[in-house]
Image (tube, rainbow, N blue to C red):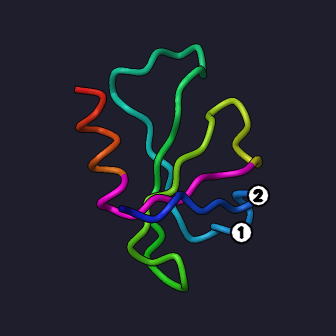
Amino acid sequence: MTALPRNVPSTAELPEVRWLRSSYSTGANNCVETARPRSGPRTGLLAVRDSKDPAGPALLFSPESWAGFLAALR
């Protein structure tokens, strides 16, 4: 069983990341954004946040958990 996602209460705790949005998203700002922390204790995890609340919380997933989530969507 994979670990549950972790979270950070504010994306301000991830200042070094570059947030990316899918090329399929519209300009309505109703999607999620992802980032990969490259340093510190969150290295190797995938961060996910709501594009409507860029300063809000983010969920942190292991690569295996994220791959499982994407596989379930397909």
Residue at horizontal 53 percent and vertical 16 percent from the top? 27
1 relative position to 67: left or right: right
Residue furthest bottom as drawn: 40
Q: In the rendering, at what x and y percent does residue 47 appear?
A: 51, 56
The quadrant of the image that shows the N terminus is bottom left
Whether residue 74 is situated above or below residue 8 in the rendered picture? above
Part of the protein shown in magenta? 57-65
68 relative position to 40: left or right: left
Q: Residues within 10 Å of mark 2 (few under 14, many from 20)?
A: some
Marks 1 and 2 sit apart, C-alpha to C-alpha, by: 6 Å
Q: Amino acid at mark 2?
A: Ser
Residue at horizontal 32 percent and vertical 61 percent from the top? 63
Q: Nearer the viewer, residue 74 or 50?
A: 74
Q: Is residue 63 magenta?
A: yes
Which residue has dot 1 on it? 13
Q: Residues within 10 Å of mark 1 (few under 14, many from 20)?
A: few
What label does residue 10 carry, if any?
Answer: 2
Q: In the rendering, at what x and y percent does residue 40 appear?
A: 54, 85
